[in-house]
Amino acid sequence: MYSSETTALDGLLGDPVRLFLKIAWPGRAAVLLTLIAGAICPPAAFAQNEAGCATEGAALHAMLDTEYAFGEKAQASVRGAFLEYLAKGSWILNPAPEPGPPVYKAAKDNEDKLEWYPVIGDVAPSGDLGFTTGPWVYTDTGSGSGSGSGSGRQRHGHFLTIWRRDAQCQWRVQFDGGISHATPTSLEPKLRPDQAPFTNTELPPPNLVTHDAAGHAVSDFQDTAQRDGMAAALRTYGRDNDFLFYTDGQSPIGIVAANAYLTVHAIVGAWKEEVGGRSADSTLVYSVGELTDGSGHRTHAYAQIWQYDPKVANWGLRMLLVNPLPPPKTKS
């Protein structure tokens, strides 16, 4: 894995440096770098930031509370829920990455149901960036989903959402995407805000932040995937214990299963970022964009979430979503 081979210190010291189902993907539908100068405060210093917003575990609980409020709002109106909780500069997969608010403003309300809940969530210790993921179920009532069945037919999948806290200490969706897959055989347990574990972690040393070691990890992974294949890149950069891979038609899978899947179902192409960002303490980083083929045609949409691991003094890939895009239309 990424552990022993690619510590960021090695690189710096020398050689190796969700829209309704009918609108978007069938799920829930540049880089902001804050350099930390001088001495880095220990994790306890993040109990509250300078604006008085919660950090660490309290921030995780607040983000999860917002996720549940988001889902409850969607029971009355999916469109209204997204318009309320999407940040102004947010992006969604539709199925390619694009700004989210205009898509939902153009959408029409209907009585189809979209339900979800989180099973995994985490935030940066600085409390300004986090993510949630969990299952969704879409129920077609025949009121506007496009199928016209009205039979209560359901579809299933998983969402992946990136959250950012605003200046008023409110959590808003910065990115929303997901996958569709077969009906699950069992239900996953909900991650309740008051039960969510938060593991405090050491912050990256100032020199790693200053030299953008997180950005180097992202670009090195993408270069390796383009050169040697995505399975090979995952073996080096995927986190051992908590990595998850998302792709349409497949339930989320861990690092071993993802390597096996990508060995058989090779995904290749050049990475083109559309939007990205990071937490104030640089422990959490994300990148959203597209993969293109040799002709420059878009082949896949992707989302990456990276997290700092002090054990190896480097950033490891925590979440990777890669969905195929429709082929380009040909002139008739």
Image (tube, rainbow, N blue to C red):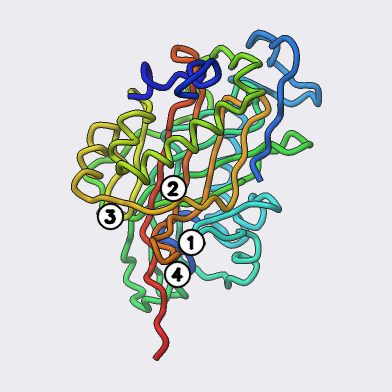
Q: Which of 9/108 is in front?
A: 9
Is disc 3 placed on a helix, strand or loop? loop
Q: Residue at x 44, y 47 (%)?
A: 159
Q: Taking 25 as reference, is 228 left or right? A: left
Q: Which of 220/2 is in front?
A: 220
Q: Taking 257 as reference, is 92 left or right? A: right
Look at label 2 and name its amino acid: Phe
Alpha-carbon neighbours of circle 3 within 10 Å: few (<14), some, or many (≥20)? Answer: few
Image quarter for residue 141?
bottom left
Q: Earlier in the sequence, mark 3 or mark 2?
A: 2
Q: Residue furthest bottom?
A: 332
Q: Which mark is residue 249?
A: 3
Which residue in the structure is indicated by mark 2?
159
Look at label 1 and name its amino acid: Ala
Q: Which mark is residue 130?
A: none
Using the image, determine if residue 35 lies above or below residue 301: above
Look at label 3 and name its amino acid: Gly
Residue 88 picture location, percent across and down: 71, 53
Which residue in the structure is indicated by mark 1?
96
In three-dimensional space, the C-alpha distance between marks 1 and 3, rounded to whole angstroms, equals: 17 Å
In three-dimensional space, the C-alpha distance between marks 3 and 2, rounded to whole angstroms, equals: 13 Å
